[in-house]
Image (cartoon, rainbow, N blue to C red):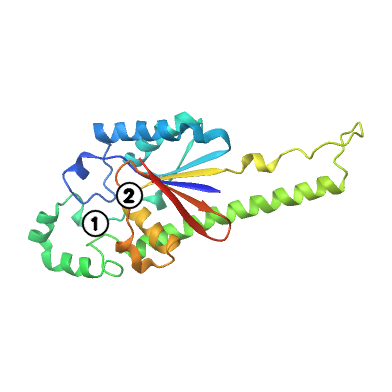
Amino acid sequence: MKWLWIRHGETKMNRQKRYVGHSDVPLSEQGQREAEELAKRWAPANEGAVRIYSSDLRRCIETARPLAAAWGVPIAAVPALRELSFGTWELFTYEQLMEEDGERATRWYDDPFTSAPPDGESLRQLGERFDPWLRSVLAELKKSRSATREHRGAMLQDGGKHESGSAHEPASTADDALPELIAVVTHGGVIRWFQAAWLAQDPGRYWQAEGLQHGEALLVDWDGQRWAAQSVTK
C-alpha cells in the first residue's frame, strides 16, 4: 500500500518566517498554485481506491481540495494531524521570539522533546497525539484486509456459485473499499516526526530527517510490517 505524505502549500506567514502552529491561516497565492500543481501531478494515481486525510487547519484543507476534486473523494479532517502548537509564541519570528522570551526559547531549542512553548506542545506531545491516530488507521486497514480474506475463503469453500449453480470468480467485495493509495495532507513538523519515529524508528532523529518543502510530497510504501520511503515529488 502506498502512502503520500504531503506538506501544505505556502502561506504568507511561512514566507515571513513566522512560527505557524495551530494558527489557522490560509494559503498564499503561491501556496494555491502549489496545491493545484500537486493535484495535476497525482491526479492519475486514482486508478485504484484512494483516500485523503488532512489536518483540519485551513492551509491543509485548501491544499487537499484540488487533489480531492481530481480523485473524486471526500477529505477526512483530522485534528491529530495539526502542526506542533507554539502556544504564546504563535506567529513570532525568530528575532521576536529571542527578544521577548530568549531564555525559555533557548531551553526549547536545546530540548524540544520535553520542553514546550508556553501553552504550547513539546515534540513528545505531538507524537502522543499523532502516533495513536496512525496506529488506529493501520489497525483498521489490517482488520478490513482480514475480513476480505475470510470472505474470499468462504466463497471458495462454497464453490463460488451463483444461484444458477454456475461457477465463477469470487467477486471483489470488501477489497473495493480498501485504498491502494492514502494521501495525508499535513504540516512540516508532523511529517518530520513520521520520518524519524516511523521511517527511521528513532524519534531522536527528528532534526536529522530531511523534511519537505511546501507543496512537496513523500511517497512511502507500507507492506503491513515496515515502511519504506520511495521518492519526494513537487
Residue 159 shown left or right of residue 153 in the figure? right
Q: Amino acid at mark 1?
A: Gly
**Residue positioned most to the front:** 231
User: Observer-nearest residue: 81 or 184?
Assistant: 184
**Label 2 environment density (alpha carbons within 10 Å; few <14, some 14–19, many ≥20):** many
Q: Label 2 belongs to which residue?
A: 212
Residue drawn at the location 38% of the way across and 62% of the way down = 196
Q: Relative to the observer, which residue lies in front, 208 or 20?
A: 208
Q: Percent position (x, y) of residue 133?
A: 47, 55
- Please count the marks in the image: 2
Image x and y of residue 2, in percent: 52, 47
Which residue shows up at 24% across the image and 56% down it? Answer: 86
Find out whether the residues at labels 2 and 1 contact each other: C-beta distance under 8 Å. Answer: no
Tag nearer the camera, 2 or 1: 2
Q: Foreground: 209 or 115?
A: 209
Where is residue 15 shown, x and y percent of the image? 19, 42
Indicate the secondary structure of the residue bearing disc 1: helix
> Quarter holding the C terminus?
top left
**Picture quadrant where residue 88 is located:** bottom left
Circle 1 packing at 10 Å, graded few (<14), some (14-19), many (20+), is: some
Please state the horizontal and vertical placement of residue 42, each as a whole percent of the image.
Answer: 45, 35
- Residue at the (36%, 32%) spot, across then down: 37
Kindly identify which residue carries mark 1.
87
Marks 2/1: CA distance?
Answer: 23 Å
Most distant residue in the left direction: 99
- Counting residues from the start of the chain, the first of labels 2 and 1 encountered is 1
Tell me the quarter of the picture where residue 210 sits. bottom left
SS under mark 2: loop
Outermost right residue? 165
Residue 63, labelled with which disc? none
Amino acid type of the residue that numbered disc 2 sits on in the rendered structure: Leu
Pick the residue in front: 167 or 52. Answer: 167
